[in-house]
Amino acid sequence: MARLETNRSGEMEVFVRVVERGGFSAASRDFNMTPSAVSKLVGRLENRLGTRLFNRSTRKLHLTSEGQRFYERALGIIADLNDAEQEAAIAKLPRGRLRVTANVPVGLHCLVPLLPLFRERYPDVTLDVTVSDKVVDLYEERADVAIRSGPLPSSGLIARKLGQCRMAIAASPQYLVKHGRPETVDDLQNHTLIGYNFQRVIPDWPFRVNDQDISVMPGGVFNVGDAESARKLALAGGGIVRLAHFHIGQDICDGRLEVLLDAFYPGGGVDINAVYIGGRGHLPARVRAFLDFCAENIRLN
């Protein structure tokens, strides 16, 4: 690899200032340098270029024809550098298209209602939001951020935890009247458990019986493609469902769903994370702003 050259843009700026100020002494004051240091810098520039830029006299500097051409080109280069720096500074402000994917419960109940507030704060960001319980490949879909529930598989993605949500096993009163209320985990084998028709990191339902962790696999009769469909199926009396409290909390409060087997349900909750593509360089301002906004405003319980 070639050796990195001296600071050529800095040399150009000093040279231009010498021309504009009419001498080394005046230019040196602008840069807080000594006149001799400015003179040496211009001398090094001339040596590197292999041509004389100034004709020096005891009282004044005069540009040579080569110096005049170099001065004119240097003005354009410095202007381009200033424009590039200004554009880079503007790019630090959140702007541009932001592609976000979120699972259905968090997307519909926690994220979508907040989008107008995000838009107020960041009017130059265009939002492209997809709500789906299927795991989206951020690389293939060219998405910026995905909001996901549960354990995260090993990947090259970076995760920012937004919190935890409590889960509940529930069914509608009409289902329970018709099929009976399960009193133990073993009773679930005689009930319709609503599952999903796509691959999940942890597909089964966890329980704790006599200080032992056990799991039950839902599905069979009903398998759906998203959590909202599971909720509506449960409300219609189709079976027993496992969903987040923030998703069905109002249904529970209004008596449309009843919580089941709470004594056998482990404490804690399911992690909710915002994941995004890491790598070299700085995170785009629009992505950082969105992550900070979600951490500040999303409420899961």
Image: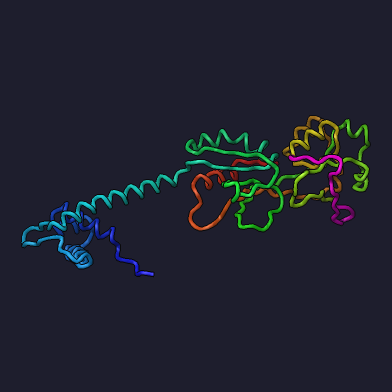
Which image quadrant: the C terminus? Answer: top right
Q: Is residue 56 magenta?
A: no
- The residue positioned farthest toward the left in the image shown: 58
Provide residue 181's location: percent of width, then percent of height. Answer: 92, 38
Provide residue 204's location: percent of width, then percent of height. Answer: 81, 50
Provide residue 145's location: percent of width, then percent of height. Answer: 59, 46
| Nearest the eye: 300 or 238 | 238
Q: Residue at x 33, y 47 (%)?
A: 83
Which image quadrant: the N terminus? Answer: bottom left
Q: Residue at x 83, y 31 (%)?
A: 236
Q: Residue at x 44, y 47 (%)?
A: 92
Q: Is residue 217 magenta?
A: yes
Provide residue 136's location: percent of width, then percent of height. Answer: 65, 47
Q: In the image, which residues are magenta? A: 208-226
Res 33 quadrant in image: bottom left
> Is 301 left, or right, of 260 in this rendering?
left
